[in-house]
Each structure stands twice: as C-alpha cells, then as structure tokens.
Amino acid sequence: MYALVEILGKQYKAEVGKTIQVDRIADKAAGDAVEFATVLAVVDGDNVKFGAPYVEGAKVVASLEEEIKGDKIRVYKFHKRKGYRRTQGHREKYSMIKVSAINA
C-alpha cells in the first residue's frame, strides 16, 4: 500500500516504514508527529482511489526524524572582458520524515 501525498507544494510517494526526504518543515522538532491530509491518491493492490484534487478522509501520519543539509551549490556569474565575476554558494535544508501510517 502506498499513497501519493502533496507536502509543501511537491508530490511524494509515501509507503509505510519508508523514510522520505522533503523540504524543511519549519516549527517542528525531531520526534514530532506530523499529519498530511493532502493525499492525491491511495493505492492498495487493485484498489485505487484518486482525489479531485484530494482523497476525502485520507491522511498520511509520519514522524520527523532529523534535519539535514543538501549538497553545496556554487553559482558563478561571469561577463567576458568586463571584469565582472561573482561567486555565491547555497545549501538547502531538508527534513527526513518516516511514514508510520496511511489512513484511507
């Protein structure tokens, strides 16, 4: 059984017991339980439910495990023959959540 769930504007495949890397969930600490009611589809073998846009009464229950940082990204801007060079770095933060239940 799995569900397609929308978390912070992005879609993820949630399976019970699996860990998902999502964009950082603010205002939550490690170990907190989170619920997502924005379930787009629930698949259980041959039984499939699709929402319009969300499946009514369905939710995904998960626990927040940790916050991690992604890979560093270097942004380099350059204009030839002008002496223009700019370097900027960026490192995105992510939350790791473990799916504990899918209530359909």
Image (cartoon, grey):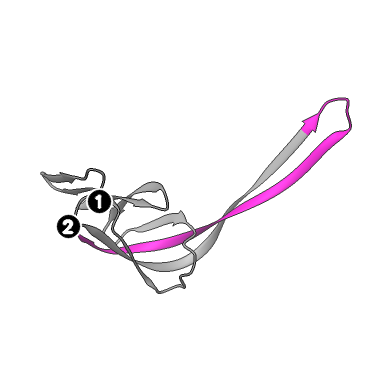
- Region in magenta: 78-104
| Residue 101 belongs to magenta span | yes
Q: Residue furthest left?
A: 46
Total labels: the figure holds: 2
Q: Amino acid at mark 2?
A: Ala
Q: Earlier in the sequence, mark 2 or mark 1?
A: 1
**What residue is disc 2 on?**
104
Q: In front: 59, or 85?
A: 59
- Answer few, some or many: residues within 10 Å of disc 1's Cα (few below 14, many 20 plus, some between 14 and 19): many
Q: Is residue 85 above or below residue 93?
A: above
**Image location of residue 60, percent across then percent down:** 27, 60
Q: Position of residue 36 (x, y in %)?
A: 32, 60
Q: Are marks 2 and 1 in contact (CB under 8 Å)?
A: yes
| Residue 77, x across and y down, in percent | 75, 35
Q: Is residue 49 left or right of residue 60?
A: left
| Mark 1: amino acid | Ala
Residue 87, percent across and down?
A: 76, 43
Q: Secondary structure at mark 1?
A: strand
Q: CA distance from mark 2 to mark 1?
A: 9 Å
Residue 37 part of the magenta segment = no
